[in-house]
């Protein structure tokens, strides 16, 4: 029995039979990431969703547990979202939304937020912008506040595969591997903030916690054979090369030297 309106992918159900209980696998990256985020907020928290997009998770079929964990609106003080795409203005998970052109600073005062979330956003930041992005995110955070990000590992199998495909071919390639993924949810990738070394260089003045995570291999389409091969590769891969990086940076309390 699963949530009304959502049925787990047949390949997911076949290889992860526990998905029949709630619609998600034991390795689900959303559950992992947003459970930890929920531990960082309370009813007074002001949260910034950096790169919030149209909020497809709130309108497309998804396990109810994932939606419940991700829907912070109504459970925290305020959820503000920014994105380069005007679609953010219709995101139902936000109290307030702002369109911020690429390269522009965030239109918020210093120390405005308790938590900043960037979910699958950092891989789209280029080399010329990464320092400004990192500094601006930390600027709007309160001392002691958290920056939480989930992004492909540059040296993981997803990152390596994505960089092997030219950006102009991403939509066509993903439409074959993931036919349910909408073209408007595919963006050019840069991979300039996607290694532990990059992150420590950019956020080293603060407390940086990074760990690898291996979720079910949804990027490999619907073939059970492809999933099994990817899962085997994941088990054999050292943690340093895990497909996804979970990133948590706590802003320093005192002056940064």
Image (cartoon, rainbow, N blue to C red):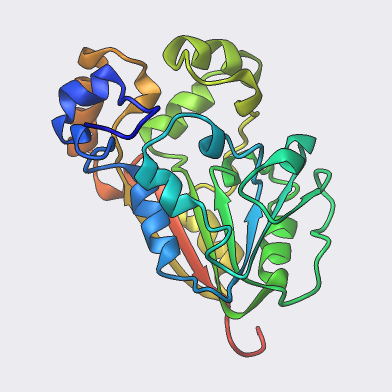
- Name the residue at 45% across, 62% down: 37
User: Which x, y percent locates residue 199?
Assistant: 53, 58
Residue 256: x and y, percent?
A: 65, 83
Q: Is residue 166 visible?
A: no
In this view, 227 is above or below 129 = above
At a point 58% along the width and 76% down the height, the residue shown is 44
Q: Is 157 left, or right, of 165 in this rendering?
A: left
Residue at 51 percent of width and 68 percent of height = 249
Return the residue nearer the eye: 44 or 11: 44
Give the residue at x 71% y 77%.
111
Looking at the rendered image, the quarter that the C terminus falls into is bottom right
Furthest toward the front, the residue is: 4
Q: Is residue 119 left or right of residue 11?
A: right
Q: Indicate the position of residue 101 as horizontal and vertical percent values.
A: 84, 44
Nearest the eye: 154 or 122: 122
Quadrant placement of the N terminus = top left
Tell me: residue 70, above or below residue 210: above
The one of 146 and 168 positioned closer to us in this rendering:
146
């Amino acid at each position: 029995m699963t949530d009304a309106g959502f049925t787990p992918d047949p390949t997911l159900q076949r290889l992860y039979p526990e998905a029949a209980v709630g619609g998600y696998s034991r390795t689900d990256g959303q559950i992992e990431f947003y459970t930890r985020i929920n531990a960082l907020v309370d009813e007074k928290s002001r949260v910034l969703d950096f790169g919030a997009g149209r909020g497809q998770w709130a309108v497309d079929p998804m396990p109810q547990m994932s939606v419940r964990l991700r829907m912070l609106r109504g459970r925290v003080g305020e959820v503000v979202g920014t994105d380069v795409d005007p679609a953010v203005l219709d995101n139902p998970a936000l109290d307030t939304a702002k369109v911020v052109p690429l390269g522009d600073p965030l239109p918020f005062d210093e120390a405005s937020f308790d938590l900043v979330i960037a979910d699958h956003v950092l891989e789209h930041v280029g080399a010329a912008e990464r320092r400004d992005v990192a500094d601006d995110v930390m600027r709007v955070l309160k001392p002691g506040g958290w920056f939480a990000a989930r992004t492909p590992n540059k040296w993981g199998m997803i990152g390596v595969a994505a960089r092997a495909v030219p950006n102009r071919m991403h939509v066509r390639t993903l439409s074959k591997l993931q036919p349910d993924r909408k073209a408007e949810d595919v963006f050019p990738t840069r991979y300039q903030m996607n290694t532990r070394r990059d992150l420590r260089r950019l956020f080293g003045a603060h407390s940086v916690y990074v760990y690898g995570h291996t979720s079910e291999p949804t990027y490999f389409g619907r073939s059970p054979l492809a999933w099994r091969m990817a899962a085997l590769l994941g088990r054999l891969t050292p943690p340093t090369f895990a497909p996804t990086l979970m990133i948590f940076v706590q802003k320093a309390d005192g002056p940064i030297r």
